[in-house]
Image (cartoon, rainbow, N blue to C red):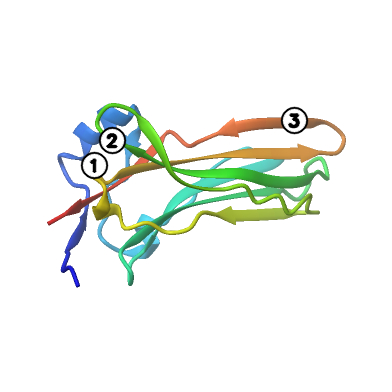
Amino acid sequence: MRSKRLRRAGTSGALVAAALGTSMVVAPASASAVSEWKCYGTQVERCATVWWDEAEDTYRARAKITDMPGGGAYEVKVTNVKLINFDGDRLVTVKSKQDYDGWHDTEDLAGTATVDPCDYGNPSFEVKATFSWRGAGSGEKTWSPDQGWSMFCD
């Protein structure tokens, strides 16, 4: 069994962020700070995060969409969730989940299987997903937060 120690991105996180073209989560090593949702939208809220399981030291992509109270009374779904790694040259999908479980009245949540971030030369990740809603108006958008997540492995 391999021994590993993970720690969150610190000052050199800016270098990884520059490579990803996104801002970097710089947080203490705690699940509540690390696995914080990044959300956008008012009538339909779209959220994504690279979820860190602190006990297992694993990452996975998670996405959710919510029809907000007082909005347009939309049905919602989230599909095509991807955990993406920057391998030094390009972005590569390392895990994905189609999640075609249909439309939901108020909220849908989907997530990929987990990965050990230390199995990758550059343990920097982001998440993308397709968010859909229908009702008084309709739309579909592939979206990801302008955010990256990183681990340093020793």
- The amino acid type, in three-letter code, at marker 2 is Asp
The amino acid on which the numbered mark 3 sits, given as a three-letter code, is Gly
Look at 79% across and 49% down and name the residue there: 103
In the picture, the disc for residue 87 is 2
Disc 1 secondary structure class: loop
Image-quadrant location for residue 35: bottom left
Tag of residue 38: none
Q: Residue at x 35, y 61 (%)?
A: 58
Which label sits in the foreground, 3 or 1? Answer: 1
Q: Which mark is residue 122?
A: 1
Check contact, mark 3 vs mark 1: CB within 8 A.
no
Residue 55 left/right relative to 44: left
Note whether 75 is above or below 114 in the view shown.
above
119 vs 55: above or below = above
Indicate the position of residue 31 as horizontal and vertical percent values. Answer: 36, 64
Residue 139 is labelled as 3
Please identify, in this view, whether the residue under mark 2 or under mark 3 is nearer the observer: 2
| Gap in angstroms between the C-alphas marked 2 and 3 | 32 Å
Instruction: Answer whether labels 2 and 1 touch (C-beta < 8 Å).
Output: yes
What is the secondary structure assignment of the residue under circle 2?
loop
Lower position in the chain sequence, tag 2 or tag 3: 2
- How far separated are the C-alphas under marks 3 and 1? 35 Å
Q: Quadrant of the N terminus?
A: bottom left
Could you tell me which residue is drawn at 34 percent across and 27 percent down? 21
Q: Mark 3 or mark 1: which comes first in sequence?
A: 1
Name the foreground residue: 129 vs 133.
Answer: 129
